Amino acid sequence: MDKQTISVKEAASYIGISKDLVYQLVRESKLPHLRLSRRILFRKEALNEWLLTQEKLSIQQNKTIY
């Protein structure tokens, strides 16, 4: 059975950033996550959607620069 959620360490590896940056984005409410007591968990589907959104924003910003 596949896990429904992944840890901070797994999320960092999954999206290719450091754990410190994951914690920073969580503190700033910029990365979709859920909190169970003191644990921070992520759904891969939510991370995939977030990545797509970030990509679209990046493309839009590049269009306005050029």
Image (cartoon, rainbow, N blue to C red):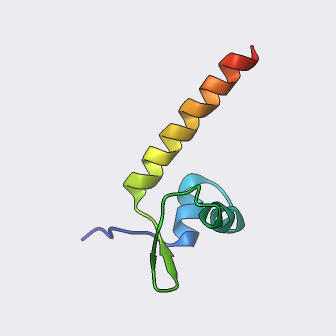
Give the quarter of the image for residue 21.
bottom right
Residue 51, image x, y percentages: 52, 44
Nearer to the camera, 56 or 5: 56
Residue 61, image x, y percentages: 67, 26
How many numbered callouts?
0
The answer to whether 3 appears left or right of 63 in the picture is left
Residue name at image x 57 percent, y 40 percent: 54
Residue 63, image x, y percentages: 66, 17
Residue name at image x 33 percent, y 70 percent: 3
Residue 55, image x, y percentages: 56, 35
Where is the C terminus found, in terms of image quarters? top right
Nearer to the camera, 62 or 30: 30
Give the quarter of the image for residue 62.
top right
Q: Is residue 36 above or below residue 56?
A: below
Nearer to the camera, 64 or 45: 64
Q: Is residue 43 above or below residue 51?
A: below
Residue name at image x 55 percent, y 57 percent: 31
The answer to whether 30 appears left or right of 47 in the picture is right
Residue name at image x 59 percent, y 62 percent: 12
The answer to whether 37 appears left or right of 12 in the picture is left
